[in-house]
Image (cartoon, coloured by chain):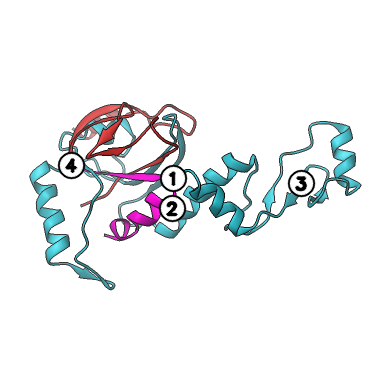
Amino acid sequence: MTFATMEKQFNDANCQLVGLSIDGLYSHIAWLRTIKEKIEYKGMKNVEVNFPLIEDIKMDVAKMYGMIQPNEDSTKAVRAVFFVDPKGIIRTIIYYPLSLGRNFDELYRVLIALQTADEFGIATPADWRPGDDVIVPPAGSCGTAKDRMDGKEKNVKCYDWFFCTKPISKDDVMKAVLKKK
Amino acid sequence: MEQAIQNEVVSMPRIGDKAPSFKAVTTQGEINFLAITQVNGQSFLATRQTLLLFVLLNL
């Protein structure tokens, strides 16, 4: 339900959602109808799931993606999230046990951070949010390292020669990420 | 039986791997994941700079 309510936000950030559940198509349809017509939870109601939900009653796809983890449960898929980029490469994997709900704000942060890293050629530090400083790639030569430590690279702040950051505004991040649409 | 289940553990994909492709039925028609060009009128891969988030939902 939570993901469905955030679908537009994810779509706007160049992301298409695909769901999967170990159940048959008709169970899926009944479940989606129940969510829309009967469930009211945490202020969410009349929620319509507009992204495809894969039926996987034989667990073929779930096994392929390592979602069946027998020591957790041999007939239920653990909660998992895969970010796959436009080249079909897996960029992030997050697994949760069955008892632990996902954090959708974190998933959105991952989505923005992955695209920011690609767009600007940087890395993001712990707990990064759009607007926070980012990590620039380590200096590839002694000259670059010296220039950075001497403060010759504009807007780059070095804590040591191998660890330098620079600011990227939230506006710049969101413009870069949302511009692709 | 338990041993059989233990032995059934399949390999898990890793970051940087090509995402495993598959064909499946969905609530919005069939998809051919990673060969997808269109599902329900929406483009997935290759046709635009779309970062595809594939998420498992549990019933």
Query: Please, what is the three-letter code of the amino acid marked with disc 1?
Result: Lys
Q: CA separation, marks 3 and 4? A: 47 Å
Residue occupying the point 88% across, 49% down: A151
| Residue type at the position of mark 2 | Leu
The chain assigned the colour red in the figure is: B
Q: In whole angstroms, how far apart are the C-alphas of marks 3 and 2?
A: 26 Å
Label placed on residue B28:
4
Instruction: Measure how far apart labels 2 and 4 are at the Cα level.
Output: 24 Å
Q: Is A116 displayed left or right of B58 in the figure? A: right
Where residue A77 sits: x, y (%)?
26, 43
Q: Chain of mark 3?
A: A
Q: Quadrant of residue A5?
A: bottom left
Q: Position of residue B11 (x, y in %)?
A: 36, 28
- Compared to residue B1, the image places residue A27 above or below, namely below
Of circles 3 and 1, the one toward us is 1
Q: Secondary structure at mark 3?
A: strand
For mark 1, give the secondary structure.
loop
* Chain identity of mark 2: A
Residue holding disc 2: A107
Instruction: Measure the C-alpha gap from mark 3 to mark 1.
Output: 33 Å
**Rendered-image quadrant of the C terminus of chain A:** top left
Residue under label 1: A181
Q: Which mark is residue A163?
A: 3
Chain A on-screen colour: cyan
Q: Kindly identify the amino acid type of the residue bearing the numbered disc 3.
A: Phe
Asked whether the viewer can see residue A128, the reply is no
